């Protein structure tokens, strides 16, 4: 909605402006802007390798009417986590940050779990924690999301791995959490799908971002379900047989990479890099004082602000 500041016979209009950062840079506000709508998405986690959980989406934070100064502000775009080599867990995504003094920080997504990982901070089969958590390997829990906690939540947990084998040798993994939903758990006949991302119209069109990666499947005898990445750019799990490597997430969506399936050996998919979008709304500025009659008319038309 247009905003009238002060008042006058002459009104200056500053048009709406949307600035998108796909890489690290500096944001400088327009002269009349004092607040903006801001979307900050961190890098997604990588999928686990050789039968791994899906990577979790990067933290997703959208804030309306956030104060912005006239001085330039640093913007950091988090890289996606690397998909895991065979037998290892996916790497976490990196944080995205807007501003310096009172920054908006979104946490990178957690990497997908895999057995026989030597990371001492979590059990070997668990997905890692993050903005959204990575999916767990067979008998492993999904990684927690929304860590560190913020309100509204920046993400969801990953799905757990299957707790019982179906067809001989099947040990299926959970999907990575997405910004809009938790990752699905693995089942005896296939890995869990990645959690869906969230839609936003901040860029002028309705775009969904930050989906979780699909969890990998251990395939010996059919049937099996090949897990898909969550809506918003999550990577699909690998297909047992060939290619078993998980798909990479879509860049600049903060989505998680797909987990690898087995056999044979394969790598997890890479997480998608993050993005920051800043929307400055239209501003109308006046050069002198309005008379009371005009003020009344502007208030009645819902076109006045005391800011």
Image (tube, rainbow, N blue to C red):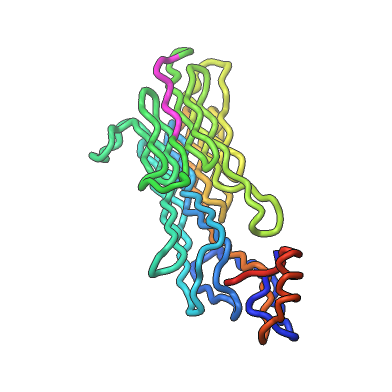
Magenta stretch secondary structure, dominant? loop
Pick the front one: 129 or 306: 306
Relative to 63, residue 52 above or below: above
Residue drawn where x is 51% and y is 57% of the image: 40
Pick the front one: 260 or 1: 1
User: Which quarter of the rendered picture does the C terminus lie within?
Assistant: bottom right
Is residue 159 covered in magenta?
A: yes
Residue drawn where x is 35% and y is 39% of the image: 88
Q: Quadrant of residue 196?
A: top right
Identify the magenta region: 158-165
Q: Quadrant of residue 197?
A: top right
Residue drawn where x is 52% and y is 39% of the image: 213
Relative to 118, residue 285 above or below: below
Pinpoint residue 141: horizontal percent, then vertical percent.
Answer: 37, 29
Q: Is residue 85 left or right of residue 70?
A: left
Pick the front one: 83 or 113: 113
Pinpoint residue 70: horizontal percent, then vertical percent.
Answer: 51, 79
Is residue 294 covered in magenta?
A: no
User: Which quarter of the rendered picture does the N terminus lie within?
Assistant: bottom right
Residue positioned most to the top:
167
Pinpoint residue 55: horizontal percent, then vertical percent.
Answer: 46, 41
Residue positioned most to the front:
292
Q: Is residue 189 visible?
A: yes
Q: Is residue 154 visible?
A: no
Pick the front one: 188 or 64: 64
Relative to 7, residue 37 above or below: above
Relative to 240, residue 89 above or below: below
Pinpoint residue 43: horizontal percent, then vertical percent.
Answer: 47, 53
Residue drawn where x is 63% and y is 69% of the image: 305
Question: What is the number of callouts on the image?
Answer: 0
Residue positioned most to the left:
120
């Amino acid at each position: 909605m247009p905003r009238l500041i002060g008042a006058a016979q002459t009104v200056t209009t500053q048009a709406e402006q949307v600035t998108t950062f796909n890489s690290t840079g500096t944001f400088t506000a327009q002269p009349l802007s004092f607040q903006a709508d801001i979307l900050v998405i961190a890098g997604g986690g990588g999928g686990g390798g050789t039968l791994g959980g899906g990577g979790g989406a990067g933290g997703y934070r959208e804030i309306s009417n956030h104060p912005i100064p006239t001085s330039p502000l640093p913007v950091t775009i988090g890289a996606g986590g690397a998909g895991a080599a065979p037998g290892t867990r996916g790497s976490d995504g990196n944080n995205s940050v807007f501003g310096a003094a009172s920054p908006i920080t979104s946490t990178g997504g957690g990497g997908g779990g895999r057995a026989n990982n030597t990371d001492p901070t979590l059990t070997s089969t668990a997905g890692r924690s993050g903005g959204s958590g990575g999916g767990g390997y067979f008998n492993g829990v999904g990684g927690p999301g929304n860590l560190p906690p913020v309100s509204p939540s920046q993400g969801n947990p990953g799905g757990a791995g299957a707790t019982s084998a179906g067809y001989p040798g099947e040990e299926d993994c959970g999907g990575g959490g997405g910004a809009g939903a938790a990752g699905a758990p693995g089942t005896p006949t296939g890995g869990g799908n990645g959690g869906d991302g969230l839609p936003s119209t901040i860029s002028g069109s309705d775009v969904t971002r930050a989906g979780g990666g699909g969890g990998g499947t251990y395939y010996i005898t059919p049937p099996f379900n090949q897990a898909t990445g969550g809506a918003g750019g999550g990577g699909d799990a690998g297909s047992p047989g060939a290619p078993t490597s998980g798909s990479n997430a879509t860049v600049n969506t903060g989505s998680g990479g797909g987990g690898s399936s087995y056999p044979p050996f394969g790598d997890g998919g890479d997480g998608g890099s993050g993005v920051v979008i800043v929307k400055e709304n239209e501003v109308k500025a006046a050069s002198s004082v309005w008379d009371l009659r005009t003020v009344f008319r502007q208030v009645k038309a819902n076109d006045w602000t005391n800011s």
